[in-house]
Amino acid sequence: DQQVKQNSPSLSVQEGRISILNCDYTNSMFDYFLWYKKYPAEGPTFLISISSIKDKNEDGRFTVFLNKSAKHLSLHIVPSQPGDSAVYFCAAITSGTYKYIFGTGTRLKVLA
Amino acid sequence: EAGVAQSPRYKIIEKRQSVAFWCNPISGHATLYWYQQILGQGPKLLIQFQNNGVVDDSQLPKDRFSAERLKGVDSTLKIQPAKLEDSAVYLCASSLGVGASTDTQYFGPGTRLTVL
C-alpha cells in the first residue's frame, strides 16, 4: 500500500526553465510534507517543507504547493540549474507519529 | 557542524552471513532512525530511537534484524543471517527529538549492502 506516490520516475528540463515535480498521497491524516534531494552516494538532504495549514511555501528558487482537496503537492524549481540534477523524494507525516512516509522518488536531470 | 556519520560505506557479504552497521548522529540529537532503501524505492523506516529507548520498530524484521543505542548516542544495526533481499542502502538519520512535525531529519551517507 503506497501511501505516497511519485508517478514520474524521471524528468528532464533545460537549464533556466521551470522544473515541476509531483507527489500524490492517499492518507488524509498526513498534515506535514517535506521534499528531500539526493545525490548519488550521498544521503537525502532536506530541501523544503509545508504544513497542511498552508497551500504554498517558498524558499529561494524552490516553491512547494499543496492542494489538500486533491491530495497533491508539487515542487517548483525556478530557474533550474545543472546542480539541481538529483533524485527528489517527497515525504509525509502524521502529527503525533513523526514517521516519515517517503515516495519512490523522481530523478531530475537539468540539461545545460 | 558535523553531520551524521555512518560506516562502512560499502559491504559485500554472502547470504547467511552476519553484518553490522554503525551510525553516529549529529551531536545533541535525541532521536535516531534507521531506514532501508531498496533500489527504485523510497527509504522505509526500520526503527526509531528516542535517546536509548525504542519508539517504533514495527517494520523491523526482528527474526534477523536487531538494533541498539546503548548510551543514547551512536547506534548499531545488525543483520543475522542476511538474505538476498536485504541488499539495499541502509540510511541513518537523526533529529533534535522535540516531538513536532517540524523536527527535521538529517541523513547520513548510507551503507550500501550487497548480499550474494
Image (cartoon, rainbow, N blue to C red):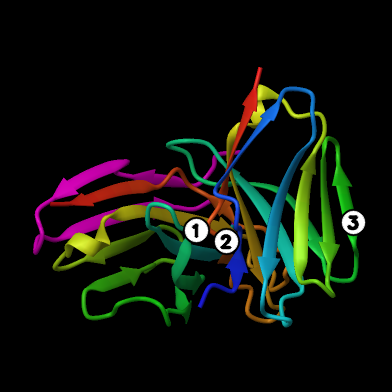
Residue B51 appears at what percent x and percent y? 51, 70
Q: Are marks 2 and 1 in contact (CB under 8 Å)?
A: yes
Nearer to us in this view, B101 or A13: A13
Marks 1 and 3 on same chain: no
Residue A61 vertical position relative to residue B56 in the rendered view, above or below:
above
State whether residue A87 appears in this view: yes
Rendering quarter of residue B28 = bottom right
Residue A3 appears at what percent x and percent y? 59, 74
**Type of amino acid at the residue the image marks with label 3:** Lys
Residue visible at 65% across and 27% down in the picture: A110
The residue identified by callout 3 is A56
The residue identified by callout 2 is A103
Q: Secondary structure at mark 2?
A: loop
Q: CA distance from mark 2 to mark 3?
A: 20 Å
* Chain of the residue where label 2 is placed in the rendered structure: A
Q: Which numbered disc covers residue B42?
A: 1
Residue visible at 50% across and 63% down in the picture: B32
Q: Which residues are magenta?
A: B1-28
Rendering quarter of residue B61 = bottom left
